[in-house]
Image (tube, rainbow, N blue to C red):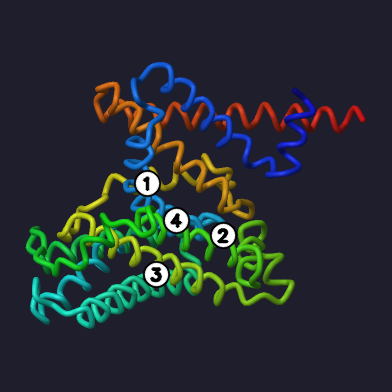
Amino acid sequence: MKAIAQKFNATFGADMTGPAIAFLAVMVIFGLAANNFISSATFGSVAFQLPELGLLTLAMLLPLLTGGINLSVTFTANLSGLAAAWVMQIYGGVDASPSAFLLGVLAALATGGAAGLMTGAAIAYTRAHPILVTLSMMIFLRGLGEFLTRGGDVSGFPSFIAPIGHGQLFGFPIPLLIFVICVGLWQLLLTRFKLGFGLLMIGSNIEAAQYSGMNTRRILVLVYTLSGLMCAVAGVIMLARFNSVRVGHGESYLLITVLAAFLGGIDPFGGFGRVLPVFVALIVLQLLSSGLNLMGANQHLATALWGVLMIVVMAARTIVSAYFASRRKKG
């Protein structure tokens, strides 16, 4: 057993221990307790529901790695979706052309990028705590969206948009493919680009990063701008999935994105974390939700169990890390 654990850590990294334990636990428990849990229907449901939460978690991931946070991810996504919706409404609504949709996507990316840019600039140049800045941005975006929509939603889009939220390509859900591409981009960013190394340095010790000659302000601005752009992608996916946009869509996802990141081994204080364990953690959370639905459990119970799962996995990860640390000391 020890040899298996050591081989696993050497191959996948110690931060995969928690998500792997959680994945196996969920599969075994619900495989025994829920009928038809291990089926194509369950995994199909997970594949279509995962991208919304997953994209928002990716948007949360980069700020967390710098030791910050982005509490405005859901409202940035919704306002970006509203920007795309308004562009399509201007150019015909349900009769809008593909070029109008592309223009709407650009408007969404511009909106998300601008929100992230303002947030990053405020954090980088005022040195205000990210919680305060992003909380202020969240309140601003929510208020702005409700003012512009009068608390309602925007709907009525061309039919060719629907496959982006519900369609398949070569047997794979299109939103899942988009999410996997985004996971790959974040993986490349963190492992192959100077920005990835820089944001991890900032998360470890921002003073040391400054003394080493890094432009920490520029890195922080880029981090939050990229976070905003990922929010915009999530906003477009939600627009296509729900065929409408509302300021409050996905509001409950905010704290779950933080939960998924920490479950995936992201250091709460920044400086350490990888994309793959977070991806596995997201699958675990979605499988947990689907398993409880099959058992007829209340959705509020699923939310409570997400918290319990987080505590259990963090405890297990701490115990495993302590075990291997003691073994190394012994020689």
Nearer to us: label 2 or label 1 = 1
For disc 3, the marked residue is: 229
Q: Does 112 sit left or right of 95 as displayed? A: right
Cα distance between the residues tagged 3 and 2: 17 Å
For disc 4, the marked residue is: 60
Q: Which amino acid, by three-letter code, is at mark 3?
A: Leu
In the figure, 88 relative to 302: above or below? below
x and y, in percent, of residue 99 in the image: 23, 83
Cα distance between the residues tagged 4 and 1: 20 Å
Which residue shows up at 27% across the image and 23% down it?
Answer: 297
**Element carrying mark 1:** helix
**Element carrying mark 3:** helix
Crowding at mark 2 (Cα within 10 Å: few <14, some 14-19, many 20+)? many
Q: Which amino acid, by three-letter code, is at mark 2?
A: Thr
For disc 1, the marked residue is: 47
Residue 328 image-quadrant placement: top right
Q: Kindly give the residue lying farthest to the top in the view shown.
A: 33
Cα distance between the residues tagged 4 and 2: 11 Å
